[in-house]
Image: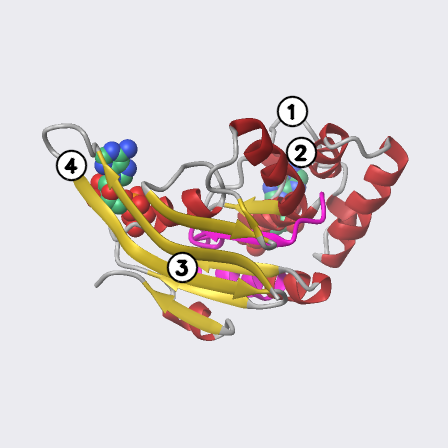
Amino acid sequence: SDVLVLEGISKTYGLAGPAPVPVLSDLSLSVAQGEVVALVAPSGAGKSTLLHIAGLLDTADSGRVLLNGRDMSGQNDRTRTEARREQLGFVYQFHHLLPEFSAAENVILPQLANGVAEGAARARALDLLGRVGLSHRADHRPAQLSGGEQQRVAFCRALANQPSLLLGDEPTGNLDPATSDRVFDVLMALVRETGLAALIATHNLDLAQRMDRVIRLGG
Ligand code: ADP
Ligand code: ADP
């Protein structure tokens, strides 16, 4: 079944103003459960806009966004925020971990915000960190970790609340090529183990080829 469906999405910035910027025009795509889709686009083609719309952080001018079969397009902010918290995980080029907190705490906190009990949240955090090879780093703060380790913690945080869809914006784009490769493998293994659907934007064609399907935007 399709976890994410975008139907006829159009988006123009400054639609009512003097200098409208058309970005997406009648775009449709879907991502099925367990499928990892690469989104490859030249800079400025609207990759971030698309991820923001799919991630319910922004709205399209027209078209529909279905998440697990539910049309999210016309829903109010509260419903969209709830769906985002419960069903979506995000990973970015930069980890955005909380610097004052340990790796484990960074994975625990979003679970507490979702009402998970502390013991269960800690157990899940340690399990996830173990899967990405960071059991020995659980009590370290982000600044004590290497770039690749920081991104791996960010993956664990993204999966903390067991989302059904992972959205990635160049999740290994800030790492040197060899580290990027290794860390991408870790991400793929994690996604495969959890049966997640994923839509991952990348400029790296080698990484894109390793996903199940490639969608090209613009260019
Ligand atoms: P990408 O992520 O593919 O580089 P973006 O989705 O960030 O592209 O942006 C696509 C186009 O829309 C670019 O030309 C960008 O300058 C423009 N754009 C993005 N955000 C805004 C905004 N808030 N207002 C006006 N134009 C924007
Ligand atoms: P990488 O090979 O991923 O670039 P680094 O060379 O940055 O990693 O670091 C190697 C190891 O040293 C990593 O396991 C990292 O966690 C650890 N490390 C780096 N900086 C610190 C620090 N300030 N405190 C504790 N451990 C650190």
Give the foreground label among 3 and 4.
4
State the mark number for residue 141: 2
Tell me, yes or no, if residue 11 can be seen here.
yes
The amino acid type found where label 2 is placed reads: Arg
Residue 66, image x, y percentages: 52, 51
Verify whether residue 19 appears in magenta. Answer: no
Tell me the distance, in whole angstroms, between the alpha carbons under discs 4 and 2: 44 Å
Give the foreground label among 4 and 2.
4
Q: Are marks 3 and 2 in contact (CB under 8 Å)?
A: no
The residue that appears at 78% across and 50% down in the rendered structure is: 135
Tell me the distance, in whole angstroms, between the alpha carbons under discs 3 and 1: 30 Å
Q: Are marks 2 and 1 in contact (CB under 8 Å)?
A: yes
Residue 28, image x, y percentages: 38, 60
Tell me the distance, in whole angstroms, between the alpha carbons under discs 3 and 4: 27 Å
The amino acid type found where label 3 is placed reads: Thr
How packed is label 4: few (under 14 Cα within 10 Å), some, or many (20 or more)?
few
Q: Are marks 4 and 2 in contact (CB under 8 Å)?
A: no
Upstream in the sequence, badge 4 or badge 2? 4
Upstream in the sequence, badge 2 or badge 1? 1
Q: Is residue 213 left or right of residue 131?
A: left
Q: Tell me the SS state at disc 2.
A: loop
Q: Tell me the SS state at disc 3.
A: loop
The residue that appears at 71% across and 49% down in the rendered structure is: 162
Observer-nearest of 134 and 218 = 218
Query: Where does label 1 land, which residue?
Result: 100
Magenta segment, which residues? Answer: 161-186
Verify whether residue 174 appears in magenta. Answer: yes
The amino acid type found where label 4 is placed reads: Pro
Query: Where does label 4 land, which residue?
Result: 20
Upstream in the sequence, badge 3 or badge 4? 4
Query: Where does label 3 land, which residue?
Result: 202
Residue reaching furthest to the left: 18
